[in-house]
Amino acid sequence: RMVFDIRRFYRELEIKSPASCCNGTCLYDENDVLLTDVRMDKNIVKKIIQITDKSNLGMVYIVGDKWYVQDRENYAYQKKHQLYSKDCLVENFTDLLEKSIPNKVVVMDEDKNILNSFKQVLAQNGITDSDVFFYEGKNFIEIMPYGADKSLALESLSKAYNIPLSRIIAIGDDYNDMKMLEKAGLGIAMANAMPEVKKTADTITTSNQESGVASAIRK
């Protein structure tokens, strides 16, 4: 989630708290001061832009609390516009890269075969999971800095607030939560989590349809 959408839930709950977004590449304190800001490699982003432009693939370019597209006609914009409460900025990615390197980019298409082909082209151009971190779904591929994951945000949070990792609880349900669950003193998986995620966790709470986070906190 983007930080502005995380804050929206905080306002509804009437709480002030740090917020981690972009898979741990950005960490904000309770006053929206940026504590962690991990960016991608500029040369890698340049190659990704060239490949997506040539393939006519839709891409979302995320920097902190802003998200960009090159036009509002592509599939990526249509899907992300439904998800985010704040609208995007429109800018040519090649020009934008000279001003601001992203925390992550998201390449989207409704055809998974096209996304698989895109990833093969990345590999042919020297971009593999030893260079970046990939997180994939049925209609997207998120690309982030190598080594960036939610456990990084957990470590930053621990240092910023002087709280030992052994005293931090992490709750998750998807593959990109696994390292965070391993890093925390107590890793809790949702009942609706992927099987591999449950194996990583120390314990399991109820599902997201049964207020699993609230149940874990109350315990």
Image (cartoon, rainbow, N blue to C red):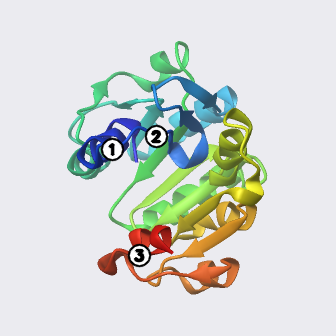
- Residue 46 at x, y percent in the picture: 60, 29
Q: Quadrant of residue 104?
A: top right
- For this view, does 24 lie left or right of residue 14? right
Identify the element where label 3 is drawn. helix
Residue marked by disc 2? 17
Q: x%, y% of residue 36?
A: 63, 31
Q: Residue at x 40, y 42 (%)?
A: 59
The amino acid type of the residue labelled 1 equals Tyr
Give 89 or 93, whichever is nearer the viewer.
89
SS of the residue under disc 1: helix
Q: Secondary structure at mark 2?
A: loop
* Side (left or right) of 150 relative to 55: right
Q: Nearer the viewer, residue 4 or 83?
A: 4
Mark 1 highlights which residue? 10
Asked if one can make out residue 113 in the rendered structure from this viewpoint, the answer is: yes
Q: Residue at x 75, y 46 (%)?
A: 131
Estimate the spatial distance between the alpha carbons at disc 2 and disc 3, rounded to whole Å.
20 Å
The amino acid type of the residue labelled 3 equals Gly
Name the residue that disc number 3 marks. Answer: 212
